[in-house]
Image (tube, rainbow, N blue to C red):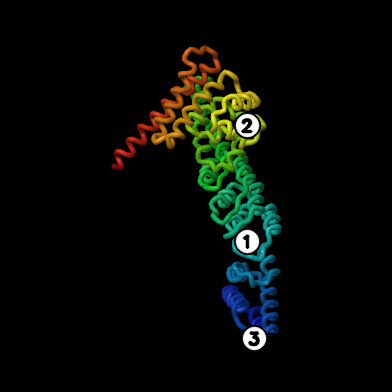
Amino acid sequence: MIVREFLIWIETAPAPRRAEAAHALARAYLYADVDDETRSAMEAALTLLLDDTSSDVRLALADSLGSSDKAPRHVIVTLAADQADVAELVLSRSPLFIDAELVDIAAAVAGRLQIAIAKRPVLSNAVAAAIAEVGDREACLTLLANPGAAIARISFRRMAERFGEDFEVRDALLGRKDLPADVHQRIIRAVGDQLGALIVRKAWVQEPRAKVVTREACDRATVAIAAETETEELSALVEHLRVTGQLTTALLLRAVCAGNVAFFETALASLSGAPQHRISSLVRAGRVSGLRAAYAKAGLPPLAFDAFAAALDTWRKAAGEGGPTDKYRFTMQMVDAVIARYADITDGEMNDLTTMLRRFAADQAREAARDFAKAAVAA
């Protein structure tokens, strides 16, 4: 009886009053203790309100029903296809949508509605992948800012590929603690390339020098990324570097001299095709002949082998003494041990490597000085 009277009343009531009544009816449907017949009548009334000419009425329905798993599903689905103000309320909150529906909707809409989906409290890999693939810039920024979003490696990669030149998207990607190391490195490489191109365009330095500077800056950042990467993630980082042509002798030697032997082991295993555990055993036991064979199979330059052997000897000695107490001094000792092996060599490639290592040692000295200054100021 009450529902029938309500339906008669809304035919002549003004829009603001209809919106208030729609909100009250929706709340009653969700929380009132009524019999099944009354609840069915209330559901019918809510369904009829979907045809109301006033968007305020439909907005009231979306606001009151949008977060509930008890809402009539057909009402929620209809509201999701309404105008943006209405649709975004249910798309951003309703637990009634399954992933497949959200994926389809994300592909069919744009702007505010993609953003609404991207900021749902819980977002699966599948829906996040749809946003990463077809979402606009703002939707991807919203996705990256959502702590409840499960984002797969491929989705991070797609956003880096699509929006890697956008500094806000780059910052948002780099701000994610779950950003895979290979994607992190991809972003660093892109930034380096952009800076190198700017330096050349502005004629601040000659192009060959700009390439050296940007490459070494990228290598330095890559070694730092690798040092913070979990062991199980190193393989993906190494594969990315290999495919993109960045897994160079200079990068590997820099990593070993920085004490990142796990990265070197992973790279050598990847390049040689040998099992990771065998490479680790050869490196850590100092079995030079076996290591030389794996090194040769990896296709690395023969003349540089003694450089790696010298650095690894220094690393094993420090490890046997409980590990380095001063990472910068330790790195400089590693570099000095390598350079000492090549004091009389005039080969072009080794000259390039020793020159790189000298610059690397200088970088480490500057880092040590900065850390000392910070500690002194803090004290």
Residue at point 61% right, 31% down? Answer: 268
x and y percentages locating residue 221 in the rendered image = 50, 34
Give the class, few, some or many, for how many residues have Cα within 10 Å of label 3's Cα (few <14, many ≥20): few
Mark on residue 206? Answer: none
Q: Quadrant of the N terminus?
A: bottom right
Q: Is residue 98 above or below residue 21?
A: above
Distance (Cα) linking label 1 and label 3: 31 Å
Q: Position of residue 92 (x, y in %)?
A: 60, 61
- Give the mark nearest the N terminus, 2 or 1: 1
Observer-side mark, 2 or 1, equals 2
Q: Is residue 329 left or right of residue 232?
A: left
> In the rendered structure, which amino acid carries the disc numbered 3?
Ile
Mark closest to the chain's N terminus, 2 or 3: 3
- Asked if one can make out residue 14 in the rendered structure from this viewpoint, the answer is no
**Residue highlighted by disc 2:** 242
Give the residue drawn at x 70%, y 77%.
44
What is the C-alpha distance between the residues marked 2 and 1? 42 Å
Among all residues in the image, which is located at the extreme bottom?
A: 1
In the rendered image, residue 199, in percent from the top left (x then y), is placed at: 50, 26
Relative horizontal placement of residue 200, taking residue 103 as reference (left or right): left
Q: Which image quadrant: the C terminus?
A: top left
Residue under label 1: 91
Is residue 377 rendered to the left or right of residue 17? left
Mark sitting earlier along the chain (1/3): 3
Disc 1 vs disc 3: Cβ atoms closer than 8 Å? no
Q: From this viewpoint, is residue 74 visible?
A: yes
Residue type beneath disc 1: Leu
